[in-house]
Amino acid sequence: MRIAVGLGREDGEERLERQGISRRDFLKFCGAVAVAMGMGPAFAENVAAALTRRRPNVVYLHTAECTGCSEALMRMYKPYIDGLILDTISLDYQETIMAAAGQAAEEALEEAVNSPDGFICMVEGAIPMADDGKYGYIGGKTMYDICKHILPKAKLNIAVGTCACYGGIQAAAPNPTGAKGINEAYADLGIKAINIAGCPPNPINMVGALVAYLDNVPIDLDELGRPLMFYGATVHDFCERRPHFEAGEFAPSFNSEEARKGWCLYDVGCKGPVTYNNCPRVLFNETNWPVGAGSPCIGCSEPRFWDVMTPFFKNN
Amino acid sequence: MSQANTAPRSDYSGPVVVDPLTRIEGHLRVEAEVENGKIKRAKCMGTLFRGLEIILQGRHPFDAPHFTQRVCGVCTYSHALCSTRAVEDAINKPIPPNATYIRNLVLAMLFLHDHLVHFYALHALDFVDVVNALQGDPVKAAQIANSISQRDVKPETYRQVQAKLKAFVDSGQLGPFTNAYFLGSHPAYHLSPELNLIGTADYLEALRLQVKIARAMAVFGAKNPHTQFLIPGGVTSYDSLTPQRIREFTELYRDALAFVENYYIPDLLAIAANYKECATYGGTRNFMAFGEFPDPGGERDIEKRWLKSGMIFDRDLGNVRAFDKDKIAEGVSHSWYEGDRPLHPYEGQTIPKFTSMEDSEKYSWLKAPRYDGIAVETGPLAQILVSYAQNQPEVKPLVDNVLKSLQLEPSALFSTLGRTAARGLEALVIGRQIETWIKQYENNIASDKQIVENYEAPKSAKGVGLLTAPRGGLSHWMVTDDDARIKNFQLVVPSTWNLSPRDEKDIPSACEEALVGTPVADPARPVEILRTVHSFDPCIACAVHVIDGQTNQVHKFKIV
């Protein structure tokens, strides 16, 4: 049985060994993160170092969301989520998995955000801004006020998923709750979160951003706040069906010989050419991705994709 | 093993508020009035409103599954499939058998994933004291583990767990265990140190195993969470027809079932045997099950499902009634919406009208769905009871054996413990059936390779999707206009049935009813409230009933 409960001190790799993760497996994962970061395989050693030193405090907040990003993070493999939360980071507040509830949970949060070592804040979800934020409460406080209290204190803010980045689905027209992404919601406070877009984002992109920060790798962002190392190319650029696009071979419908043969899905709505993300290169769940399953890309890492990319099954 | 069949009690009288109620999906506040150590009255309050149904108005019906899937990332796929069924009901034409086979296989894996993650990641810490695991004897723990299951665990495994756990605790960075109710000992936690050790080890193991189960969903469904392979008319993943993909799915499925058989069920029974007091409270009286896993060609016919649908009233297992979808109506008398009477989902009107968090009359963003005016419970317990009462051969003997091994009567099922046990049994029953479905699918594709039909969006049509999600009966109700765009879209969700506020007759919801009589040994650390609420596996993002909208416009969204 492989178990991962560790010290979070200096013997990270030995701890991983004891959990049944060989150095080879671990470096393979680190290599995948390094490649996703655009750093080349040699950078794997740096990734490994960042993942095995003393655990930094992390506070993970949920606002207007569906918990899909937390679930995506739980699908991390090699190291698995238990390794991440028990060996790599000190996840001091995360409502989906934390043992404490109610007042005890709120106290854990206060303790973490006042830690002398500082903390990294990850936010999943949009901020409901309409009507003084009354569409979202936690512990008797509005989500808007909670984040206003916490985000400015963090050493780093990471917006996890398209909701936290740009408002996401609840911000789709007519945006009944006035939902916004955190950079827009707290622009007046100078908040500049890194946007890890996607619905949900690939967990490699979430962890990769953390690693880059912990390893002092400069994180170049595009004009939408997304790290270029993950969002520097379109889905179309690396799509396995791109040769069909180039050859003018398109599936006219889902029940067609062309669809069966795996031809390009542009005519059934694929938004890959205008969507920046690394899905075809890193895959989801280590095995597949939407176009691989014959489904057109819906553009989920782009702002306002629920409005500008719909209808999803049509182009133009 | 210790036996403690009476719940520890305090003499506390007064309010207890749990907010945020963690280890659930979404944002929930529970307020309870405790009298002499027992809950007398409780309120469940959904505290987030997102407004997805109004967002759906005017959109293409085929986009609905993508939108509704984002209601919830935990029971991901349930909403997408339910919406797809609603659109197909409005289209009113058949879909290829392979589409139903593939959808069923993905749904079955969702049940295994969701129930297993709920038991270990969301519920186990209500029973397992992780720190007390340090006191357990690894030799005894291995003997116990090997005696209750098909495992072959060595004491060394548990020694390693303890060594690492000790180092973790000594580091002072407790991470997700910070401020846990079990820290510093708690009178309502009473597993032996050895069972705490087994539970802790398996809690961690389950975190890894769930990655594989989710991967099985992605094999046919592109990714998890938020699958992407459904289209009204069928599925898009031609890859699913290949032997490589079927083999990959089968191997992952077998690993998942082995874990359910050898870890989940034995651990569940060991916890149940030590927390029998949880079988003495937390019950409700009325149950609703939609059944699930349709035969090919019968996706919209609730009568053609492998697990049976039905209604049970007043705990009468001898009289299962047929489910009638016309008997659903939703009220808003205690919800932050305008409205004067309960309405059927096709006619539903929802106008948000937030008052305040302190309002005693209106106190939740959840509406109050009722069946024929009756508050019902839905979910694994309802499904198991409805199948049990109809003598379903895959269910009845299994339930009887479990009751016998725990020395409990069938009446014990109507409880917090019964609800948690039923979830495990549902996972086991479904898990054991998957092999058969894979074979049927393989036989079918030998001569039939079609997975999808091309259909147009329906004009001026109505359709309903009825689905049993891991949390219970889910229904989506859609009306389209002359341009084949969505005119009205309503979601009536399991957690809304289970955790709604009171209705216009002041009848509480299932969870509010279940909390009455739940003991509270330590009002500062009310773990018994967590046990009862978690036994429903709440999903509040799903439950917060979002705007329909034939009439209301954005400008009406004013806080009063």
Image (cartoon, rainbow, N blue to C red):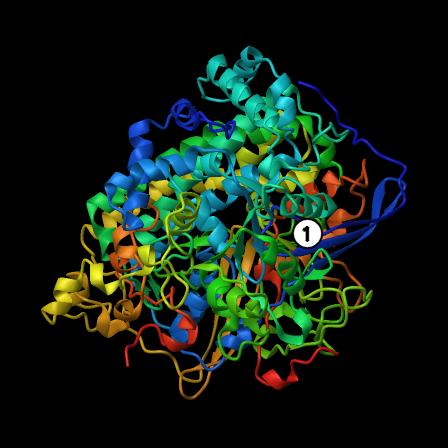
| Tag 1 subunit | B
Q: Residue, x 38% and y 57% (percent of image)?
A: B227
Q: Nearer the viewer, residue B144 or B391?
A: B144
Give the x, y percent position of residue B166: 58, 22
Mark 1 is surrounded, within 10 Å at the Cα level, by few (under 14), some (14 to 19) or many (20 or more) other residues, namely many
Q: Quadrant of the C terminus of chain B?
A: bottom right
Q: Nearer the viewer, residue A25 or B547?
A: A25
Residue A40: quadrant of the picture? top left
> Where A120 sits versus B300, above or below?
above
| Disc 1: which residue | B20
Residue A231: quadrant of the picture? bottom left
Q: Residue, x 67% and y 41% (percent of image)?
A: A100
Callout 1: SS: loop
Query: Label 1 sits on what residue type?
Result: Pro
Q: Quadrant of the N terminus of chain B?
A: top right
Q: Nearer the viewer, residue B506 or B199?
A: B199
Asked if one can make out residue A79 in the rendered structure from this viewpoint, the answer is no
Give the x, y percent position of residue B220: 31, 52
For residue B305, side relative to residue A58 (left or right): left
**In the image, farthest residue toward the bottom:** B482
Give the x, y percent position of residue A156: 51, 52
Residue B482: quadrant of the picture? bottom left
